[in-house]
Amino acid sequence: MLPVVETDEEWDAVVPDETVMRPGAEDLCARLGLAGEPLTRFPDGSQPVYAVGDEHVLKLFPGAAAEDGIAEGRVLSFLQGRLPVPTPQVREFGAYENGWQYVLMSRLRGENLARSWDRVPRADRERLVAEVGHALAVLHSLTPDPLQDVLGPGDWGAFVDRQRAGAVEQQRAHGLPEVWLEQIPDFLDSVSLPRTPQPSLLHTEVMQQHFLVDPGGRRLTGLFDFEPAMIGDRAYDFVGVGLFVTRGDPGLMALLARSYGRTFEPAVLLAYTLLHVYSKLPWYLRELGEPGEKKLPALAEAWFGTGLTP
C-alpha cells in the first residue's frame, strides 16, 4: 500500500500526504490485528506517527530511514522496564513492504513537557530536571553491548574526526555569521574529547519535546523517540539537556547535574554541540540568546555553566 521512498524527492511527495499514508497505515493495522481502530496522526516529528485507538502508537519508517526503525524497535525492546521514567513498550516491529519498517508500541500518558513548561512553577521545574538527570544516569549505566549491531557510530574517535572536518560548513549552511564561524576550528582544537570513551547508550535528543508529564506538571510520565540513539560518550547527551531542557539556566543545570552524579566542562558540551549530527547553531542562538561577548568560551558558559566544579 505504501510506495517506495528512497530519495528526498520521494520523501517530500509521500510522507506528508495523508491520502497516501493513511491507507497504508490502515492496511498495516489490519495486518497487526487492529482493523477498525481510529487513527490519529501526530502533527510533530520527522517520521509519520499515528495514535491507534487509545492504547497503541504506530510509527512508520520509509526505506530511506529503515535503519532508524530497526534501531528504535531494538532500543525500546532493550529498555523495557529499565528506566525510572516510562518508555513505550514494543508490541511488534519489523518490515512492512517496499522497504518500510514499523514499530507498534504502547501509548504513553501525559502532556508534552515542552507545551506545559511555561505553566510549571519553579519548584516543579526543579523536581522535573532532577528526574531527567536521574533517568539519564540510569540510561548511561546500562551496558549497550546487545545493541552494538544496530547502533553507530562504532569508532567514536573517527566519528568525532568526521564531524570536526565538516563543522564549519555545517554551520555555514545554516547561516551562522562569520564572527562565530571563524572561531570554530581553534575552539575545537582547544577542547580535549575522548576518542575511546566508556560506551554509553545515548538518546542523543534529550529535549523537553521528548518527555511527557502528568497533568499537574509535577512528575515525568514518559520518554520517547529513540530512533537517533547512538553508543558513545555520555557527555554528548548533555547537548540536548543544556539547549532544550535547562535552556541556559545554570541553577537548573546544576540541579540536573547533581541528580545525574557529575558535571561536564561547558567547553566540552559546546564542542559536542558543534559536532552534533543535527547541530544548528543559528537556531540555538535565536532560542537562547547570545552572551555579551561574541566568543565561543563565553557561549559555552552561558548555555552549559552550572557554577559547580566538574
Image: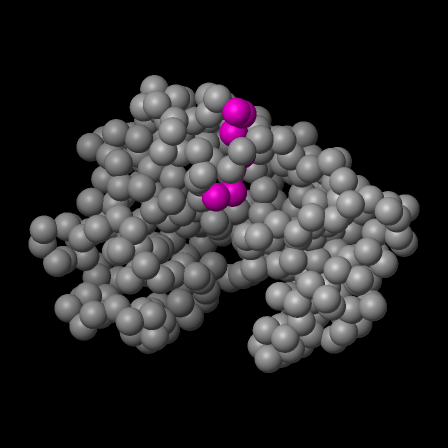
Please give left or right for residue 242 compared with residue 62 in the image: left
Above or below: residue 218 compared with residue 16 = above
- Which is nearer the eye, 229 or 200? 229
Vertically, is 22 above or below 199?
below
Horizontal placement of 37 versus 85: left or right?
right
Q: Which residue shows up at 45% across the image and 66% down it?
A: 158
Q: Is residue 61 magenta?
A: no
- Which quadrant is the N terminus positioned in? bottom right
- Is residue 210 magenta-colored? yes
Left or right of 23 in this view: 211:
left
Q: Vertically, is 283 above or below 216?
A: below
Q: Position of residue 241 (x, y in %)?
A: 39, 42
105 or 78: nearer the viewer: 105
The reply to whether residue 186 is visible in this rendering is: no
Q: Is residue 298 above or below residue 116?
A: below
Where's residue 6, x and y in %? 67, 76
Q: Position of residue 102 (x, y in %)?
A: 75, 56
Q: Which residue: 44% across, 62% down? A: 277
Q: Would you identify the image quadrant in which residue 242 lies?
A: top left
| Residue positioned most to the left | 293
Magenta span: 209-215
